[in-house]
Amino acid sequence: MSNDYSPDLITLVDENDVEHNFEILDNIEFEGKEYYALYPVFENPEDMVADSGEYYIMEAVDGVDGWELSEVDDDDLIDKLAAVFEERFEEKFSEED
């Protein structure tokens, strides 16, 4: 059994053309749409220590060149999605123990 772990990474470009790297923690389909849980990747270990540890939830939407990820603006929807993601995280990490 291999214990290799290779994270799925993605680079997003913000409205100021600044690139941000994220690890894809999980993705789900919810009410007919696809959502991703992303965690920032840090080059500097000190930045990682100072980070709040929060992950981001993004919606996959049709874009000009295929699909792209967009922020979710609805706080109630974010709460529902976070509950689903966190339940999946608990299941995944309890299976790995």
Image: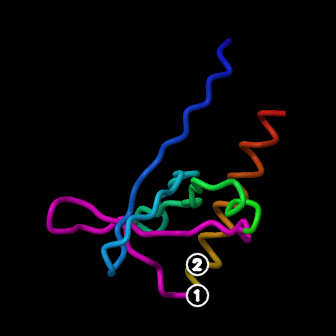
The magenta stretch spans which residues? 51-75
Residue type beneath disc 2: Ile
- Residue 86 image position (x, y, % from top left): 71, 60
The correct choice, above or below, for 4 with respect to 7 in the image is above
- Residue 61 image position (x, y, % from top left): 30, 68
Q: Residue at x 64, y 60 (%)?
A: 85
The correct choice, above or below, for 75 with respect to 39 in the image is below
Specify the quadrant of the image occupied by residue 93. top right
Quarter of the image that includes the C terminus: top right
Whole-angstrom CA distance, mark 2 to mark 1, is 5 Å
The mark found on residue 75 in the picture is 1
Q: Residue at x 55, y 60 (%)?
A: 37
- Residue 42 image position (x, y, % from top left): 59, 56
> How is this picture coloured?
rainbow
Q: Is residue 12 magenta?
A: no
Closer-to-camera residue (30/69): 69
The correct choice, above or below, for 46 with respect to 25 in the image is below
Crowdedness near tag 2: few (<14), some (14–19) or many (≥20) residues, C-alpha within 10 Å = some
The correct choice, above or below, for 90 with respect to 30 in the image is above
74 vs 15, left or right, is right
Specify the quadrant of the image occupied by residue 70. bottom left
33 vs 1, left or right, is left
- Residue 3 image position (x, y, % from top left): 68, 21
Closer-to-camera residue (81/3): 3
Q: Residues at badges 2 and 1 in contact (C-beta under 8 Å)?
A: yes
Q: Is residue 73 magenta?
A: yes
Q: How many marks?
A: 2
User: Please, what secondary structure does the residue beneath circle 2 have?
Assistant: helix
Q: Residue at x 48, y 86 (%)?
A: 73
Which residue corresponds to mark 2? 78
Of all residues, the one furthest to the top in this rendering is 1
